[in-house]
Image (cartoon, grey):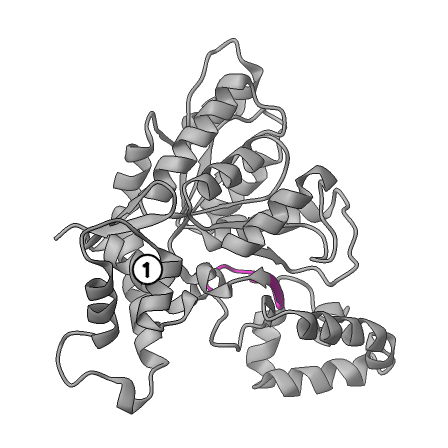
Amino acid sequence: MILQASTSLRRGNWKYLLEQAGSRQALLERCLQQEPLLGETLKPLQEQTDDWLATSTSHHLLTPDDPGYPEWLLRIPDPPMTLYVQGDPGWLWHPQVAVIGTRNPTRGGRETARDFAATLARGGLVITSGLALGVDGCAHEAALAQGRPTIAVVATGLDRCYPPRHRTLCQQIAEQGAVVSEFPLGTPPHRSRFPVRNRIISGLSLGVLVVEAGLRSGTLVTARHALEQGREVFAIPGSIHNPMAKGCHRLIKDGAKLVETAEDVLQELGELAGEQAQGLRQALEAEKTPTDVSPTADDPEHAALLQAMGHDPIGIDDLIRITGLTAEAVSSMLLIMELEGVVESLQGGLYCRTR
């Protein structure tokens, strides 16, 4: 937290300074030498954060040297020094696609956002967006309606909700996925913070899908971040008479991939999602103790989960109860199995074996 607040560290150079210092502790000591009053100034905020972390097991604070910090985000040029998470931070490691767009979509744009997000969620991708009105809200709601997780990256402290009318939606996302922010508790909304948080939306994702956007939309900022980060950018075309389609048309002219169906996106991201899922599997294996590792090629926990599932539809809660595994472990294994074609996700958050 002190590092995040230090004026000695600009958002883009902390990785370099950390390498030069050799360790996070050494960098912290250097910052306190340059700004000796910083620690005392931030003491109330530190106490507030400690209290927040203690109030719920769903409250988390991640830094780049934590094993739970998402590797995909760490690869961007300017990853956040701190991630506040409400919900399950394990979802940050799963293959994601950002579904974004204008706060004032047409009726057709809302329907398109919901249709694409629902299909992408059923296809095994976690829907990531910014909790804004319009397309963002539609994308989150569609994923939740499928019983799938979704991630909201916000531009305020997690003790605040913006926009206020999405308070219930925000709580649902935290229960079924995760709400994420790099901003300390108590941070209010401000127009300057939204472009900053947009790099996290694209940084967490394999690709960014733009549903509707005007030429001056902040959505195009996220698309630009995605291109700079080496992510795929997809845009849905619209009527030449629709001002909310002009941003998409501009992106397509600049090289974004024109998509007409969610299957187009799944086909483009399928290989990348498989690679990320493999990385997730390796991370889960690395966390096991030697006694947990199966002497055979088959993972006993995966085998137990498959046996518990059978071929009839079953929900995650029942699988957790039958297997005794944690919710995070079950969710992670289900996604991997789904990407491998072993299980299929159904409406209502149910799963069944495919073979």
Three-letter code, disc 1: Gln
85 and 190: which one is in front? 85
Q: How many marks?
A: 1
Left or right of residue 3, residue 238 in this image: left
Would you place residue 33 above or below residue 51 in this image? below
Residue 14: image quadrant is: bottom right
Q: Is residue 24 above or below residue 217?
A: below
Residues rendered magenta in the picture: 74-85
Magenta stretch holds residue 152: no
Residue at left offset 48%, top offset 72%: 68
Where residue 261 appears, as percent x and y from the top left, is 32, 28
Taking the image as drawn, is residue 93 in sight? Answer: yes
The image shows residue 66 at horizontal and vertical percentages of 52, 77
Q: Residue at x 53, y 13 (%)?
A: 242
The quadrant in which the N terminus is found is: bottom right
- Helix or strand or loop: what does disc 1 sit on? helix
Identify the residue under disc 1.
276
Please state the horizontal and vertical placement of residue 26, each as a whole percent of the image.
65, 87
Q: Is residue 146 left or right of residue 344?
A: right
Q: Residue furthest bottom?
A: 291
Residue 306: x %, y % from top left: 21, 63
Asked whether 75 falls inside the magenta stretch, the response is yes
